[in-house]
Image (cartoon, rainbow, N blue to C red):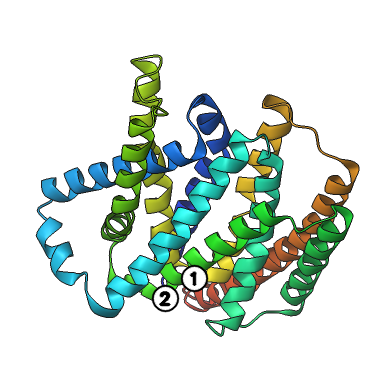
Amino acid sequence: MTPSRDGRGVLAAWLAYGIWGLFPLYFHALRPSGAVEILAHRIVWTFVLCVVVLLLRHELVALARRLRGRLALGVGIAAHLIGINWFVYVYAVGTGRTSEAALGYFLNPIVTVALGVLVLGERLRVLQWIAVGVGAVAALYLTLAGGGLPWISLVLALSFGGYGLTKKRLGASLPALHSLSAETVFLMPAALGLLWWLTAAGDSTFTVDAPWHPLLLVAAGAITAVPLLLFAEAARRIPLVTIGLIQFITPVLQLVVSVTVLGEHLEPARWVGFAIVWVALAFLTVDSVASARRRRRPADDECESLEPVEPV
């Protein structure tokens, strides 16, 4: 992997996770729409946006021809994992539990790193193993202290970790735009059915506070597609472990937004749980910095060996 390719992947990952970190503000602005309606609109308008772009690039037919067999199966799995993630996240924001969603994304880097080892055979260093262990302790503590399984946090961490793993396994099989387009194809029947059901029941909010609320719902296509395309590019360019180390920017922003803007209150036990997870992330960060320095040294040495020797 060339340094330029690695650098573009890291930048794409940072941009994707930064945008996701500000999502609570957007979903909060979509009230009175509920989680089911928002999910359906996200799928529909993302699909429409992707189809338009593919038509403009004359790539729609080529994608349809490739989407079969094992590739179609992998894309279908990724689609359903991200669909679950979308729904649970929007539900958490809509019910005033953004901090629980943030906790899920704090756990997500640890889950991602663990999946990289267990499934892809990526090797962990000592500090990374410690981080995974501390993360497991945090999940256990939150379960015991909270009197129940923190299901929102765990579902978000596992579903997005599984999504990232699936995207990594697909590798360069599909470009980012093609992959996202194919995922929305698998989710479209359910999305259209949900919108029909909401409209028939008189529960649709699409025409409320026109034109701003409808425009916000339609904007879900671009707001959903941009970070996912960035993430898909990152998943193709850099190791899954590296992706896991960058993910902390999302829950940091989510936690700040939930406490300072949305006014959520966190119990002391939840803060303790966050603190344990932050310890795990500290281990990952230290390891990441040390690893980056080790990778740079051989390159620096090579450059020095190529420098012209001055005449004596």
Q: Are marks 2 and 1 in contact (CB under 8 Å)?
A: yes
Asked if residue 70 is positioned above or below residue 284 in the image, the reply reads below
Nearer-the-camera pick, 202 or 77: 202
Q: How many marks?
A: 2
Task: Name the residue: 82% across, 57% down.
Answer: 142
Relative to 188, 205 lies left or right: right
Q: Position of residue 297 (x, y in %)?
A: 61, 73
Please tell me whether mark 1 sits on a helix, a strand or a loop: helix
Asked if residue 123 is positioned above or below residue 106 in the image, the reply reads below
Asked if residue 270 is positioned above or below residue 71 in the image, the reply reads above
Q: Which mark is residue 165?
A: 1
Tell me the amino acid under the disc marked 1. Answer: Leu
Reading the image, the residue beneath label 2 is 169
Relative to 258, 61 lies left or right: left
Q: Position of residue 224 (x, y in %)?
A: 40, 43
Q: Position of residue 273 (x, y in %)?
A: 83, 53
User: Is residue 310 in sight in this rendering?
Assistant: no
Spatial CA distance of label 2 from label 1 is 6 Å
Query: Furthest residue to the bottom?
Result: 121
The quarter of the rendered structure image containing the C terminus is: bottom right
